[in-house]
């Protein structure tokens, strides 16, 4: 077992795709397969289950990933210290809510990429479930959530500001004619939820539960834009960051309901695993994010 094999294994484990791993590492796909096969033969256990074109980590693969992350990070940290190099390099995998990626992150990406063009950035739309475990396992280097808080002693959580959520409906929604919409008025309505922007969904569902409003009639979407279009068409109601619907509200394609709860405030959280090495690339991305996101909040 050598460090090259562990780097290859870690990349395949993160991407769960041999072809994409080969592209990222600039190897032939056959070389990737050979390295993984050699590692499996040396350890005497399969690291991946091959399901047609898909691969998933076996239990042994998951255990090795935890060790591989620590070993590769330690080697990288040692090389950086011994060489005196602090130049960002390598790759970062970052999980983001879709609306945050669309409306807040582009200036960060532009500045980071212009300064460090050799760093590979991989963005994954964020779901709350399994996020903490993915950070611990090294599948994710950094994550962002829009929520009130996240409880985990081994995660470093930093607030960069806040977003305001608004309850929106299509322009023909009868509730828009009411001077004030009580939470009880939402009974019987269809709610649209996003699977890729959903960290604040729990807050909304909790408020509905406290008011005794059932939310059994709900639809789930993997695209915020598709969800907004359905709301415009009168399918139902949704709750989204105000920044994500500002243009639609201005053009009257969507209406912000005069909900008695008003605008709900959630924090923009930047999250990482506390034991993960803060590599030059990760540190640089976090520094640029702090500067631009917090600066945007102050304007």
Image: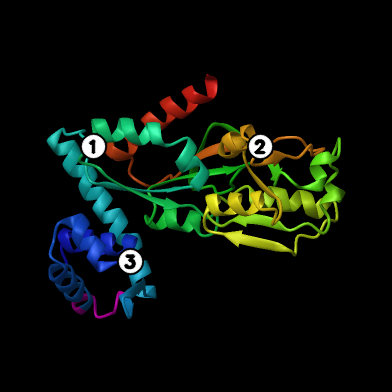
Q: Which residue is mark 3?
A: 16
Q: Does the magenta segment cover residue 49?
A: no
Quadrant the N terminus occupies? bottom left
Q: CA distance from mark 3 to mark 2?
A: 43 Å
Q: Which residue is mark 2?
A: 252
Magenta stretch, residue numbers: 41-47
Instruction: Where is residue 126? Give x, y as percent.
Output: 49, 52
Between discs 1 and 3, the one toward the N terminus: 3
The image quadrant of residue 19 is bottom left
Q: Does the magenta segment cover residue 46?
A: yes
Residue sitting nearer the eye, 43 or 132: 132
Q: CA distance from mark 2 to mark 1?
A: 45 Å
In the rendered view, does 132 fall on the left or right side of 55?
A: right
In the rendered view, does 199 fall on the left or right side of 14?
A: right
* Residue at screen point 79% across, 36% down: 258
Residue sitting nearer the eye, 212 or 194: 194
Between circles 1 and 3, the one closer to the viewer is: 3
Between discs 2 and 1, the one toward the N terminus: 1
Instruction: Where is residue 229? Give x, y as percent.
Output: 59, 51
Residue sitting nearer the eye, 276 or 233: 233
Q: Could you classify mark 2 by the number of other residues whose Cα lies within 10 Å: few (under 14), some (14-19), or many (20 or more)?
A: few
Residue 286 visible somewhere in the drawing = no
Between discs 3 and 2, the one toward the N terminus: 3
For the residue labelled by badge 1, is the local secondary structure a helix, a strand or a loop? loop
In the rendered view, does 63 fall on the left or right side of 31?
A: right
For the residue labelled by badge 2, is the local secondary structure a helix, a strand or a loop? loop
Between circles 3 and 2, the one closer to the viewer is: 2
Instruction: Where is residue 244? Give x, y as percent.
Output: 56, 39
Q: How many marks?
A: 3
């Amino acid at each position: 077992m050598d460090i090259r094999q562990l780097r290859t294994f870690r990349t395949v484990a993160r991407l769960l795709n041999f072809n994409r791993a080969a592209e990222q590492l600039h190897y032939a796909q056959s070389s990737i397969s050979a390295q993984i096969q050699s590692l499996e033969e040396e350890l005497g256990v399969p690291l991946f289950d091959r399901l047609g074109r898909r691969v998933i980590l076996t239990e042994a693969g998951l255990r090795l990933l935890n060790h591989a992350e620590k070993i590769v990070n330690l080697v990288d940290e040692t090389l950086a210290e011994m060489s005196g190099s602090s130049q960002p390099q390598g790759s970062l995998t970052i999980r983001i809510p879709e609306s945050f990626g669309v409306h807040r992150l582009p200036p960060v990406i532009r500045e980071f990429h212009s300064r460090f063009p050799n760093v590979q950035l991989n963005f994954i739309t964020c779901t709350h479930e399994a996020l903490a475990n993915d950070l611990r396992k090294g599948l994710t280097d950094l994550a962002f959530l829009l929520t009130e808080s996240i409880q985990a002693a081994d995660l470093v959580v930093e607030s960069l500001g806040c977003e305001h959520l608004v309850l929106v409906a299509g322009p023909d929604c009868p509730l828009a004619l009411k001077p004030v919409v009580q939470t009880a008025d939402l009974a019987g309505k269809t709610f649209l939820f996003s699977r890729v922007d959903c960290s604040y969904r729990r807050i909304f569902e909790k408020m509905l539960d406290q008011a005794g409003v059932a939310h059994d009639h709900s639809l789930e979407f993997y695209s915020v834009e598709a969800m907004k279009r359905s709301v415009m068409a009168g399918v139902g109601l949704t709750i989204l960051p105000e920044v994500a619907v500002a243009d639609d509200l201005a053009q009257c394609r969507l209406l912000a309901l005069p909900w008695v709860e008003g605008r709900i405030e959630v924090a923009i959280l930047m999250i990482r695993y506390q034991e993960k090495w803060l590599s030059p690339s990760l540190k640089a991305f976090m520094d640029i994010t702090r500067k631009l996101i917090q600066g945007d909040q102050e304007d």
